[in-house]
Image (cartoon, coloured by chain):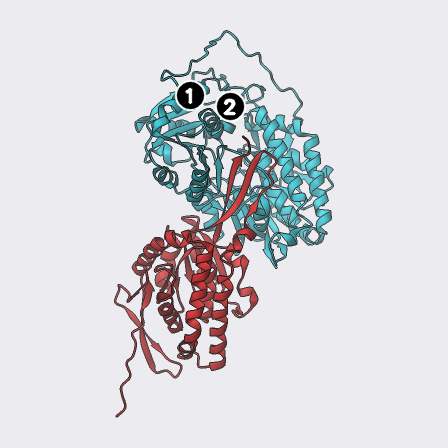
Amino acid sequence: MPAKRPNNPARELLFGDLWEFDPAPETADPNIAPRYQLFINGKFTAPKSKKYFDSISPRNEAKVSEIAHAGDSDVNAAFEAATAAFPKWSKTPGAERGKYLYRIARLLQDRAREFAVAETIDGGKPIRESRDFDLPMSAAHFFYHAGWADKLDCAMPGRRLEPLGVAGQIIPWNFPLLMMAWKIAPALATGNTVVIKPAETTSVTAMKFASILQDAALPPGVVNIVTGARETGAAIVGHPAAAKIAFTGSTAVGKWIQRELAGSDKRLTLELGGKAANIVFEDAPIDQAVEGIVNGIFFNQGHVCCAGARLLVQESIASEILHKLKLRMRHLRVGDPLDKNTDIGAINSLAQLQKIRDLVQGGIRQGAEIFQTECRLPKKGFYFAPTLFSGVSSSHRIAQEEIFGPVLSILTFRTPEEAIEKANNTPYGLSAGVWTDKGSRILKMSAELKAGVVWANTYNKFDPASPFGGFKESGFGREGGKQGLLDYAKLA
Amino acid sequence: MNRLPITKTPKCLVGGAFIRSESGRVYPLQDSSGEFFANIPLCTRKDLRNAVEAAAKAFSSWSARSAYNRGQILYRLAEMIEPRAEELVRAIMTTQPDRPAAESEVQTAIDRIVHYAGWTDKYGPLLGSVNPVASSHFNFTVTEPMGIVGIIAPEESSLLGLLSMILPAITSGNAVVALTSHARPYSSILLGEMLAVSDLPAGVVNILTGARADILPTMATHEHIRAVYACVGKAGRTEIQKGCAESVKRTVFLDEEKTIDWHSESAQGLDKIRSFVESKTVWHPIGN
């Protein structure tokens, strides 16, 4: 039998400022143009609106580039190009369509470092994540779906998959290039053409990606990229030539889109917000669980729809987990996302930073106990220290609303039934985590949790072969796997 | 002396019990010769809410049944209806006097029950998957029923049409609240009487009668209904989708303005079951 754990907490090694990290900036050239046009019908096209907006870097608030603001007539031109390209593209043999996707995957791998740096500069995520997660995963999505293009008759027994037409796609700013890959790859594999809009604050890698489409010699009009803000998105949603709308973003906007499309017969998939519970039982491997909790909430500054934002800890180990979590959080390096040692980078925008601040203030006002690590945040740019709330009850705003930032709320439970009840007590249902050593409990919990993805003894894992998407108000439709493919096809 | 026959007061099926509308309102139904046949309940949104409550109670136990058990219960339903086929034929003929058409409708309806009885333990492996992820994880996707499915049945086909919409939903363990045909409700009411004495647990299928205008808006917005399956025209689709957006509800439509061949093989099958299940993906590390 292992020796009984002493009651006094694990000793902490405090180095203070004795060993400072040297800066380790990533220096690869991101090759960002001073100005980006729209990508319509295979060409970079100046917007008819003649309007541009600045994209600034959240790491230091410096201007990165100027982005075209697509107006209604630009969106119209994009749909015309996509509609014109559809007959030929949809009749292109699957094996040939697949080869274009393989090319895109390869070209993305070739330029992965350059894209990773651009992603970090434009969006603020740590270079470690854009380099090791966003880019490889984006390429993997194209590689995976490339292989589907000539095997569409195998996805649904007894049925053939046929393309829908032009897919209008709107993506968020948290994983700009990866979300683009999630949207474009299955749409093209199934023979659809695309009009896609990246988020206003993160358009740079989307426009860089357009150059890859040119290098891959993808036929003009198959993918059209229009940049802009809310009105541009609304123009896509309302465009009569769209056969399908695919949206990833907030639940509020998702509901608006569903209402807008009422009576239109357009297909719709929504991947919306979440407020995932990460549930830790007393028999869990504690150190692994602590790593999983940290990864679950602080990955990508918490700008993750499936972030493990509500930690549910069994009461008997709550103080131990809290203690270890605080220790672990002290070692998180917050700062310049271009630094290779940075764990937590910049908050994507000032608006998002203010939203996080508001919700955190609300948590304090409602009586939850706040813990923040002492870290020196850069003077310029948008940063927020990793934050933990204990003594949170289910009714608190910080336990109900999606914060989309590095803020963790801790609640406790006594029995598995109580954990399930608390975990499911939200209109969302995107993801959940379960930490326990007991296999039967994992299977029981994953069956009872109303969530589209359940991570057991792990968290925030993704793969193009693994379907992702939500229950309830987290949206409908899946992305990835054969399940995701079906959402871009009609059955014949 | 001619005996005066006993006429029946048609009732709705909610939570396994036969109910009249809480409103006390009815509408008269004429038979095909224009004679008064019966007063049919005009259900209200309150009746719908009660039915949703009954469905919610039934859902937890119905969805927890084994696939084998659900299959047996559905097959048992077909066994019970087969000897009573003539009753259903005559029920259809009250408003649609074409006997061969009515007989054919009943036969297809019974065969459709058998078809779905066989699906209960087969759709799972066909719609789910074990996913070959690149990291060292065991990763699988299973399907789960959504919960409560609201159904607006076709006006034309009140037995076969209604059953064709109910069956794919309950096959995977959903519970159903259905509004049947306003013009031809009687065969649905008789079907309800047969469901009530089958092995199907009370509340798994609830059948309301009445006017769409009274039921449809609440069915669209009721937060506990997770999907709406409706045979309606464009105006109905618009209204339902607008209401469903409030709780991000799944919608599946059949177009009432087009002719639907309910006898066709394409009116049944795996893709219909898929419309009312959620995919759930579970990850677990592989290691010592």
Extreme top residue here?
A: A18
- Under mark 2, the amino acid is Ile
Which residue is painted at 51% across and 21% down in the image? A381
- Residue at x 59%, y 32% (from the top left corner): A134
Residue drawn at 54 percent across, 22 percent down: A59
Q: Is residue A314 left or right of residue A455?
A: left
Which disc is residue B217 wearing? none
Element class at badge 1: helix
**The C terminus of chain A, quarter of image:** bottom right
Task: Give the colour chain A carries in the figure.
Answer: cyan
Where does label 2 land, which residue?
Answer: A344
Near-viewer residue (A305 or B65): B65
Asked which quadrant contains residue B62, the reply is bottom left
Label 1 neighbour load within 10 Å: few <14, some 14-19, many 20+: some
Colour used to depict chain B in the structure image: red
Residue B86 percent coordinates (x, y): 42, 78
Mark 1 or mark 2: name the one nearer the start of the chain.
Answer: 1
Q: Which residue occupies the foreground of this view, B199 or A308?
A: B199
Residue position for label 1: A324
| Image height of B194 relative to A368, above or below | below
Q: Indicate the quadrant containing the N terminus of chain A: top left, top right, bottom left or bottom right.
A: top left
Q: Nearer the viewer, residue B217 or A66?
A: B217
